[in-house]
Amino acid sequence: MKYLFLILLLAASFELSGEKIRDAKKPECGILGDVNRDGIVNSTDALIVLSCESGQDVSQFLPMNCGDVNDDGFVDSNDALIILSYDVGLDVAYPIGELGCSKHVKPCECENGLR
């Protein structure tokens, strides 16, 4: 919970700017940022990403393709910050909330592999 509070503080003071990036490499169905596939992109999705990074079992949400909002091939705390920024109404440079998710991502990687 303290991580979520920290991320919310960061999101409140950090604004992503620029035009939304549209990427033709996102053919998979799903809403970008909607990790739990409930049709809404919100702090719950960011919490799932952070839980994965902290080693919690989030296997029910795999694959987490829609969690790779910055399209770097990984689902990690950077994506969680962007999702939280979107959720609190900050302008983000990614098409969060729109259809299309990355095909290949590596969620929650650590030195020993997938958590």
Image (tube, grey):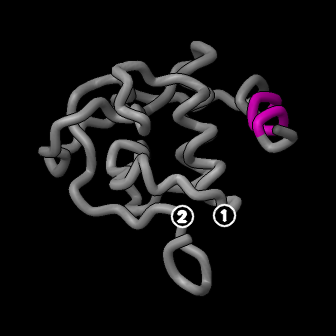
The number of numbered discs placed on residues in the rendered structure image is 2
Q: Residue furthest bottom?
A: 112
Percent x, y of residue 15: 64, 28
Image quadrant containing the N terminus? top right
Residue 38, quarter of the rendered image: top left
Q: Which residue is mark 1?
A: 55
Which numbered circle lies on residue 45? none
Q: Is residue 85 above or below residue 48?
A: above
Q: Mark 1 is on which residue type? A: Gly
Residue 113 or 17: which is nearer the viewer?
113
- Mark 2 Cα-neighbour bin, 10 Å: few <14, some 14–19, many ≥20: many
Spatial separation of the CA atoms under disc 2 and disc 1: 8 Å
Which residue occupies 58% across, 86% down?
112
Image coordinates of residue 54 in percent, x first then y, are: 70, 59
User: Farthest residue toward the top?
Assistant: 89
**Residue 108: mark in rendering:** 2
Q: Which secondary structure class fits the magenta region best? A: helix
Magenta stretch in the rendered image: 4-9
Q: Are marks 2 and 1 in contact (CB under 8 Å)?
A: yes
Question: Is disc 1 surrounded by few (<14), some (14 to 19) or many (20+) residues within 10 Å?
Answer: few
Q: Say which residue appears at 82% left-offset and 29% top-offset.
A: 9
User: Image quarter for residue 105?
Assistant: bottom left
- Left or right of 7? Residue 101 is left
Q: Secondary structure at mark 2?
A: loop
